[in-house]
Amino acid sequence: MQEIADEQVLDIRMYASRFDLIRTESVLVNGRESVIQEFELNLGGVNTHSLVLFMNLINTTWITTCAIDTTVSKYADYAPTFRSILGSIRIME
């Protein structure tokens, strides 16, 4: 999962005018090894703060993103909700 997450960072850097990776962490979500990346970027003049979950199941990588326009709101106000959303992901076989 870490390799896939790292490739995603390279892709984002190509089209974002600013990209700051804040943290990458390995976590278990629903018993599955996953990676969560936290980053800020500027895309088309909009600053966003995002959490992205990478999870693999049967040769398919699932990517779930929670993002907020930081020019409107403070990420800290939404961080617990974003974590709750990503921690609740269930992929049914």
Image (tube, grey):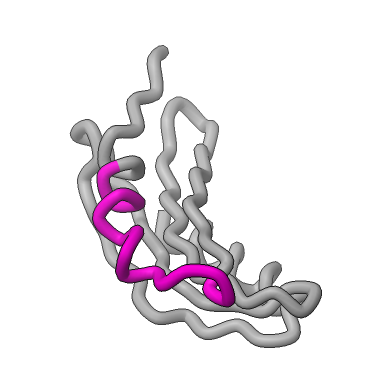
Q: Of 64 and 66, which appears nearest the observer?
A: 66
Q: How many marks?
A: 0
* Bounds of the magenta segment: 70-84
Q: Is residue 82 magenta?
A: yes
Identity of the residue drawn at 60% across and 63% down: 8
Q: Of 47 and 89, which appears nearest the observer?
A: 47
- Could you say where residue 27 lies in the image, as x and y percent from the top left? 23, 53
65 relative to 51, above or below:
above
- Could you say where residue 40 lies in the image, as x and y percent from the top left? 52, 77
Identity of the residue drawn at 80% across and 74% down: 44
> Which quadrant is the C terminus positioned in?
top left
Q: Residue furthest top?
A: 93
Describe residue 19's horizontal placement relative to residue 25 as left or right.
Answer: right
Q: Of 88 and 47, which appears nearest the observer?
A: 47
Identity of the residue drawn at 46% across and 56% down: 52
Q: Residue furthest front?
A: 72
Describe residue 38's horizontal placement relative to residue 10 as left or right.
Answer: left
Q: Main secondary structure of the magenta part?
A: helix
Image quarter of residue 23: bottom left
Q: Is residue 40 magenta?
A: no
Image quarter of residue 12: bottom right
- Could you say where residue 22 lies in the image, as x and y percent from the top left? 40, 81
Describe residue 3's horizontal placement relative to residue 11 as left or right.
Answer: left
Identity of the residue drawn at 52% across and 61% down: 68
- Could you say where residue 38 lies in the image, as x and y percent from the top left? 41, 69
